[in-house]
Structures are given as C-alpha cells and as structure tokens.
C-alpha cells in the first residue's frame, strides 16, 4: 500500500486529521504542542483504494533540544518513506516562519505535497485558505478536521495523487511466504538455509534486516517466493527511527503473502509480541505456521517437546489450527519439512466444501445442538450455508436473527466446519446473514 505522511509544525491539528482519515480515534489529540512524539500509522481506504497514513510529531527546525532533534529526525524519515505528504498548517492563522521551515524541507525532499489548511470551520474563514499558496505548492485545500468539513474532497485529492498500484511479479503457481518474527530469532538464517546460499545478511545484532527481501526458491518442483522481513520489537523497545518503517514493511509483506512463517526463539517462545504477530496474520486471512527455532540449544528432548506443545495449546488458544514445528537453522534439524508444511497450508487455504455437505452439517446441528436464544425466548434458526470464497475459506450462514450468533456459538461452528475437511494452518471466516422467515 502507498504511504501518506502528515507533517507540520506543532498544534495545527495533524492528529485530528489523522483520526478523521482513518475514521476512528487512534492518535491522542490535545491542545498541548508536542503531544505526538512517535509516528503513528493506520490503514485508510477511499474509493476502493487502500493506503497507510502516518501521523508525525510537530516539526521545529530551529529548536536545538535533544528531544526535538529526535522528533525532527523521525519526521524526515517519514517524508523519505512516503509516496505523498500532507503538509498541515493553521488555515486561519496563515503561514508562519515555522511553516516556512517545513516547506523548505519538503521542497528539498522532492515528494508530492498537498498543503492542508486546517481549522477552516465555517464559510467566514474560507478566503483565508488562499494565504497557503504563499508556501509555494500547487495543491492547496482548506478543511476542518474537527468538523469533517471538506474531508471527502481531501480524500479524493489524496487518491488522485497516489501512485498507481503496480502488479508485483508473480510466477504462476508460486507460493508467497513471509518470514516474520521478533529480532534475532533466526529469520535470515532460515531463509539462507532454504535458498541454499547467503541471500540475507545474518548477524547476532537484532534488527540487521531493514527491508523485506524476496528470494525465489524451487523445492521439489514447487516455486516458493520467500519474503524475509525485519524483526519486530515490542513498541517500548522501538528506539531507532528506522524500526518503525520496518514494522510497516512487515505489514506489507504479510499482505503480499499466502502463508506466514512465524519464527520464535525456543528459549523464549509465545511472547506477547509473538501473539500479536500471529493475530495480525490471522486477521488478514493468511495461512500461518509456527517455527520454534534454535531447538538444538535445548537438546533433543522428547519430553521437552511434549511440554512445549502443551504450553502452545495453553498460551495460544486462538491458533490451535496452526502447525508447530521444532527446527534449527544452524544444524538443519526439521528444515526439510518447512516446504512441506507450507504446501499443506496453502492447499488448506484454497479448500472448498460443497453446499450439499455444508447443509448436511446444518441439519445435524439443528437436530442435535442447542441453539442460542435471546432473553425473550426468540429461537435462532439456520436456513442454509454456502462457501463464498477461498483464501481464506469463507462461509455464509443464512439465519433468521444474525445478532443471536454469539462468539461462543461462532467458535463452535468453526470447530464443526474444521471437522468436515483439512483446514490446517488457515483461518476460517464466518458471516451471518439475515433471511426473512417464511
């Protein structure tokens, strides 16, 4: 997805605009200058085009405070990584010397810029927008982030300025595999082992890999496109500016892939960050395989393996459908099975169940299961079910009252669907649609 950064001096409404573009409250909004210190990102969509929006801290070019210097470096990095920059100013106040400093930096960057004159809350102030042309940019628009005034016009302008999506090279029949995980868990070593050559820099310094790296490998006649990514730290440990965009690129790698290999350290598995990464993959409907790397450091202990499997069942309940493999990129243990696991999960993600078989399941559920009811005793009825798509397998149940389908009942239905066929490693999506009872 293209990246759109929001920059400007402090207290011009950047975070308010960020929240409006995303349609939900993500950034802290306050009248105190400097509230936004780190970059915040979110996914926006307008007219069927998706893009990432980045909120940055206020830019002050002439403040020598060490903290401000750090914020300034972050803003510059955000601009360098952007496809489009929204330069926000206070539209009623007009350009200030601080805005001129931002404008000078943006001109040097060569990036496309839209000047957003914010705080144009009513028609009385609309003529104030023309002052913004003094900053020297062609595209200027007046908005009110607080009152959503001219917000849709701004979104139209943003979409028109974003680069056209280029079709990424895709070999027929290839399986795209993202290798993700925390820093220093052995992702690049796994890639190098699978590729049979040194394709990624390997180091024991966390964060060596900055960008996603594609490597095409043919294994037993199947083409795999392995996408190595930068390691993801817990947010409190993201200290280097560039770490932020490593996270953004990892999200993009997951969006591109068919199957994700979530690599964990056998000595420190199932961390909160591992769980968040797994949830991100499942949320995006991608296949997932868990790899416990560095297993050689714990010894070849069968009891330890059983204990680790039990710990996995206890700590990652939402991921019980995913295969768990014990490997060592250093010794090669279990590495030969990775391609086999990926192929299996990719097939599961494309699996279809016939409507006849699905409706036989519906009849069995109606006959033997206790269906939900509401406080008024309204019965829940399922009329029929169909599989609407694959990648991931998606099922639609037509019912009388969709609101009665509780999360626990949906989990039960997912378990029943998984019992019909092999859906190893792939999430299943279920939708409930109302149908007038006849």
Image (tube, rainbow, N blue to C red):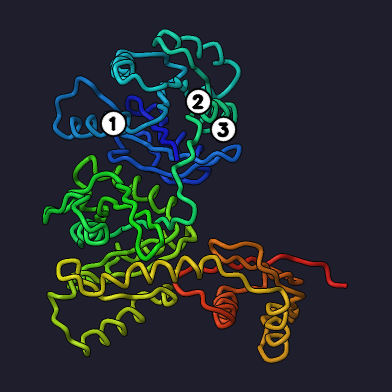
Q: On the image, numbered disc 3 is attached to which residue?
A: 148
At which x and y percent is residue 389? Answer: 62, 62
Q: Nearer the viewer, residue 319 or 229?
A: 229
* Tag 1 near tag 2, CB within 8 Å: no
Within 10 angstroms of label 1, few (less than 14), some, or many (20 or more) residues?
A: many
Disc 2 to disc 3, C-alpha distance: 21 Å
Tell which residue pokes out farthest to the front in this image: 221
At which x and y percent is residue 113? Answer: 42, 21
Q: Is residue 374 visible?
A: no
Residue under the image location 59 percent in, 26 percent down: 153
Q: Nearer the viewer, residue 419 or 213?
A: 213
**What element does badge 2 sit on?**
helix
Within 10 angstroms of label 2, few (less than 14), some, or many (20 or more) residues?
A: some
- From the viewer's perspective, is 363 left or right of 389? right
Residue under the image location 34 percent in, 66 percent down: 275
Q: On the image, numbered disc 2 is attached to which residue?
A: 161
Mark 1, mark 3: which one is toward the viewer? 1
Mark closer to the chain start, 1 or 3: 1
Q: On the image, numbered disc 1 is attached to which residue?
A: 75
Disc 1 to disc 2, C-alpha distance: 21 Å
* Tag 1 near tag 3, CB within 8 Å: no
Above or below, comparing residue 55 to residue 238 in the picture: above
At which x and y percent is residue 294? Answer: 17, 70
Mark 2, mark 3: which one is toward the viewer? 2
Above or below, comparing residue 359 to residue 247 in the picture: below
Q: Nearer the viewer, residue 327 or 192?
A: 192
**What element does badge 1 sit on?**
helix
Q: Nearer the viewer, residue 352 or 58?
A: 352
Above or below, comparing residue 208 to residue 190 in the picture: above
């Amino acid at each position: 997805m293209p990246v759109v950064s929001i920059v400007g001096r402090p207290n011009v409404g950047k975070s308010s605009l960020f929240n409006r573009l995303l349609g939900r409250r993500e950034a802290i909004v306050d009248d105190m200058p400097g509230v936004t210190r780190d970059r915040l990102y979110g996914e926006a969509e307008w007219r069927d085009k998706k893009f990432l929006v980045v909120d940055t801290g206020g830019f002050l070019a002439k403040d020598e405070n060490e903290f401000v210097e750090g914020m300034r470096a972050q803003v510059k990095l955000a601009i360098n990584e952007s496809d489009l920059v929204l330069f926000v100013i206070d539209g009623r106040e007009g350009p200030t010397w601080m805005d001129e400093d931002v404008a000078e930096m943006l001109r040097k960057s060569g990036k496309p810029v839209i000047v957003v004159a914010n705080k144009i809350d009513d028609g009385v102030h609309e003529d104030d927008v023309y002052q913004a042309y003094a900053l020297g940019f062609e595209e200027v628009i007046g908005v009110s982030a607080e009152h959503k005034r001219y917000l849709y016009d701004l979104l139209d302008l943003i979409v028109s300025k974003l680069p056209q999506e280029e079709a990424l090279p895709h070999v027929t029949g290839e399986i795209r595999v993202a290798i993700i995980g925390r820093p220093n868990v052995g992702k690049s070593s796994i890639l190098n082992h699978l590729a049979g050559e040194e394709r990624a820099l390997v180091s024991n310094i966390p964060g060596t890999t900055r960008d996603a790296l594609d490597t095409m490998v043919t294994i037993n006649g199947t083409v795999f496109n392995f996408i190595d990514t930068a390691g993801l730290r817990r947010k409190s440990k993201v200290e280097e500016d560039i770490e932020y965009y490593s996270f953004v690129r990892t999200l993009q790698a997951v969006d591109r892939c068919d199957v994700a290999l979530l690599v964990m350290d056998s000595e420190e598995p199932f961390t909160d960050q591992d769980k968040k990464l797994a949830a991100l993959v499942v949320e995006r409907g991608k296949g997932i395989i868990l790899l416990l790397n560095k297993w050689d450091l714990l010894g070849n202990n069968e009891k330890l393996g059983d204990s680790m499997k039990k710990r996995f069942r206890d700590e990652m309940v939402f991921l019980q459908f995913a295969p768990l493999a014990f490997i060592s990129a250093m010794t090669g243990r279990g590495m030969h099975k990775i391609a086999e696991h990926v192929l299996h999960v990719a097939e599961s993600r494309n699996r279809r169940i016939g409507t006849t078989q699905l409706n036989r399941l519906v009849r069995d559920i109606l006959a033997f299961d206790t269906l939900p009811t509401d406080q008024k005793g309204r019965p829940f009825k399922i009329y029929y079910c169909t599989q609407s798509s694959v990648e991931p397998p998606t099922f639609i149940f037509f019912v009388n009252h969709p609101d009665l389908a509780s999360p626990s009942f949906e989990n039960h239905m997912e378990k029943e669907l998984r019992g019909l066929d092999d859906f190893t490693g792939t999430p299943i999506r279920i939708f409930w649609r109302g149908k007038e009872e006849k």
